[in-house]
Image (cartoon, rainbow, N blue to C red):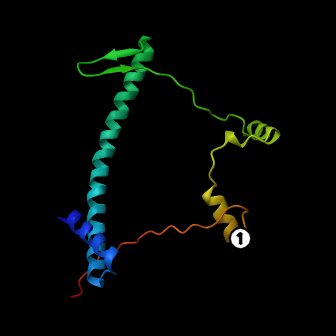
Amino acid sequence: MSDTRIAELMLFATERVLTAGEMGELADLHKEWEIKRLALDKQSTAAKAHETAAEQLLVAQMLKQEVTAAGGHDYTATLKKKFKPTVRDWGAFNRYILENQDLSLLQKRPSEAAVAERWEAGEIVPGVEKFPVYSLSMSKVTSGA
């Protein structure tokens, strides 16, 4: 029922400003769905832990037995290998980037903490602008006695 009500409120909001009562109802619905999602997240986290344990055990056994595939009744697992970069010497890595002017070796996003620190110190970081991100802080309504 609540998902239908959220859809109704979304429709109303395209036509007019929501009333204070409707906004309060929307706050309740928001929290209700958050509680439901968190319960599902707990189930998902437990399932992911079992999935990861099975995967790690399967990979370890395949490596130990020097096989590249294992077949069950329903599924076949095939061991695949790929390489990911790991920086062991940041100085050498940074020198290589600077000497070759090759920024393609880096991921393209600013460090939020480093930029925020500079903004707090009154510095302007060229090429970076502030983008507002809004969030809600929810608190339980208690009835007075």
Q: Position of residue 44 (x, y in %)?
A: 31, 45
**SS at mark 1?**
loop
User: In the displayed image of the protein, which residue is found farthest to the right?
Assistant: 99
Task: Write the residue at 70% across / 65% down.
Answer: 118
Q: Position of residue 18 (x, y in %)?
A: 31, 80
User: In the displayed image of the protein, which residue is found farthest to the front?
Assistant: 15
User: In the displayed image of the protein, which residue is found farthest to the top?
Assistant: 66
Task: Write the residue at 30% across / 67% down.
Answer: 31
**145 shown above or below 127:** below
- Pick whichever, 13 or 74, lies toward us: 13
Q: Which quadrant of the view contains residue 129? A: bottom right
> Which quadrant holds the C terminus?
bottom left
Task: Write the residue at 68% across / 40% down.
Answer: 104
**38 shown above or below 81:** below
Residue underneath mark 1: 121
> Which quadrant holds the N terminus?
bottom left
Q: Amino acid at mark 1?
A: Ala
Q: Which quadrant of the view contains residue 124? A: bottom right
Side of 13 where 133 appears, left or right: right
Q: Which quadrant of the view contains residue 111? A: bottom right
Side of 39 where 78 appears, left or right: right
- Pick whichever, 18 or 11, lies toward us: 11
Side of 105 where 98 appears, left or right: right
Q: Position of residue 133 (x, y in %)?
A: 51, 67
**15 shown above or below 123:** below
User: In the displayed image of the protein, which residue is found farthest to the left?
Assistant: 1
The number of numbered badges drawn on the structure is 1
Task: Write the residue at 27% across / 54% down.
Answer: 39
**56 shown above or below 137:** above
